[in-house]
Image: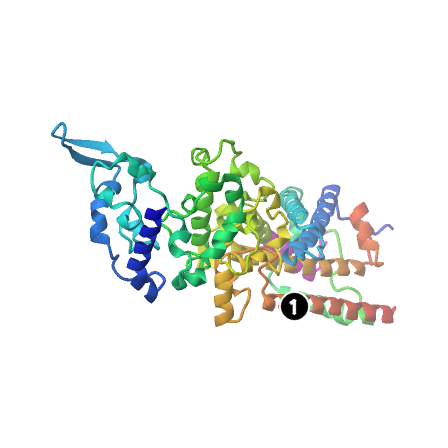
Amino acid sequence: MDQRLYLYPIWLRIWHGINALMFLVLIATGISMQYSNPDAPLIRFDLAVQWHNITGIILSINYIIFVAGNLVTGNGKFYLIQLKGFVQQIIRQITYYVSGHFKGEHTPFPVTAARKFNPLQKLTYVGAMYMLVPVIIITGLALLFPEFIVTKVFEFSGIYLTALLHGAVGFLLSLFLVIHVYFSTMGSTPGSNFKSMMNGWHEPH
Amino acid sequence: MKIRTFITFVCLLFLMPVWAQLNVDMESEPAKAADNQHCFNCHANQIYSFENEVSGMTERKAMNPNFIFQPDVFYQGVHRHFACTDCHSPDYENFPHQAELRLEPMYSCIDCHGGDEAFASYHFEAIEEEFGKSVHASRHSENFNCWMCHDPHSYKAMTRSNFKISEIVTYHNQMCSNCHDNPVNFQRISDSTKKPLEQIHEFLPNFKLHFSAVRCIECHTPAEDTLWVSHNVLEKEFAVKKCTECHSANTMLMSSLYKYQNLEARKNRGTLNAVFLNESYVIGANRNIYLNIISLVLFGLTVAGILIHIFFRIKKH
């Protein structure tokens, strides 16, 4: 019996692909601007600004598609967290990653048609997609149109505080990306989850 | 020339006691306020009135806008202890003013400040030399004088003080935009027509933000160690266009716009980038060492965690 599950519809895969590409460009251009070095530029400063602005806008539009898609298709239900027992579930999942996996135990929360994400995935995806990404989009738009930023906040430059938040959230999302990509290698084979995001079918363990 | 030299001498002699104590005493009452009131009675207003001795009537006239000066602005400026007639002919005390008085020579800064030990730290001679090299001097020669930018009736020494950076930027940029963003004023010295500043600077991302955060001279003058403000305004072809001149750790803003604050910060706290924190944000230049360390540690821990996990996965496999 074919146990494969069609979990990633085409709209989600296109969104995910665009999001991933925009993330990479935004991180590269963001680092290039923040740590600009005239002697050894990662990306030429003016180009970095231009690409960062363009990809930021594309990512923002893409995010609207993501939220709308989740509302319309029901994909959003995978992100719903039931608080009761959630901490224990998280601990179980972490314990699995830290030791159970190496002892040959089965994943405590296998992927099913009703449960696309394990509790740790839920937590990080909700944190990233519904908390950090909105913050980075809002602060990014504010930096794109700084005339709307409050000039002074307790004697600090409003732009500086906005940029600080934008940079800090950008850094956290970069960490998320690294961790996300690594955990994607923990499918039935190291490459199976990447394949899933191409063809839409989840390979069971 | 003789009259000019004489007035310069009188001017210096008269004001020496004031200058000797402090370069400009901004605290005490203006020394010549009572004398100047006579002039401000008319020149502070848009409308002035006078007794027409010919007709015997009181007449009300509109003051030429170029000759209106606000006392409160004048007394906040560096020449606040001057009498109007220290620089202008005493004949101006009579009304109607004689027509030829309009042709009286105007002093340049160096006429009064040149060779004066009390103002040695301002390097007026170096300013004069720098100005001589500038596009203002080479393109406009004798027509261009100090007062085109520095109105002696309101001038403030903004740079070497604790004014907010935003105030310094607005004040200095207003000097430039007064002609370069005002076709009427620009045509006082040039027949050429100018494109709007926004169009000329369209290569700058967010033109308005740049213009409110840095001064025109940041890009349009070369870095100058001796002077607080370089006066060698360059031909536009030589203006800074490379973003990283400002947007980098070694930002040139530290030796221009933030020079005073930078030196004060070094003196008081020893933190180079501290001056940026309160007032503005320049991406690439604002770097907080603590945040850098925290982010590097977090990133290092993440990568280390992943590597350890990979190691055990391979070992198990």
- Confirm whether residue B87 shows in the render: yes
Q: Quadrant of the C terminus of chain A?
A: bottom right
The residue where tag 1 is placed is A88
Find the residue positioned furthest to the left.
B56
Please determine whether, in this image, residue A103 is positioned above or below residue B148. Answer: below
Work out whether residue B244 or residue A205 is closer to the camera in this orientation and state it. Answer: B244
The magenta segment is: A114-133
Q: Residues within 10 Å of mark 1 (few under 14, many from 20)?
A: few
For the rendered model, the colour scheme is rainbow
Pick the front one: A159 or B142: B142
B207 or B163: nearer the viewer:
B163
At a point 67% along the width and 42% down the height, the residue shown is A73
Q: Residue at x 24, y 54 (%)?
A: B32
Question: Which residue is at the front of the view, B29 or B23?
Answer: B23
The kind of residue tagged 1 is Gln
Please say whether residue A117 is one of the residues in the magenta stretch: yes
Q: Quadrant of residue B135?
A: top right
Figure disc tally: 1
- Picture coordinates of residue B180, whole percent (x, y): 48, 39
Helix or strand or loop: what does disc 1 sit on?
Answer: helix
Tell me residue A64's x, y (percent).
Answer: 62, 43
Left or right of A57 on screen, residue B5: left
Residue at point 51% right, 46% down? B211
Q: Which x, y percent locates residue B101? A: 29, 39
Residue B214 visible to the viewer: no
The image quarter in which residue B19 lies: bottom left
Q: Majority secondary structure of the magenta segment?
A: helix
Q: Residue at 33% across / 54% down in the picture?
A: B79
Q: Position of residue B227 (x, y in %)?
A: 50, 58
Is A131 magenta? The answer is: yes
Label 1 resides on the chain identified as A
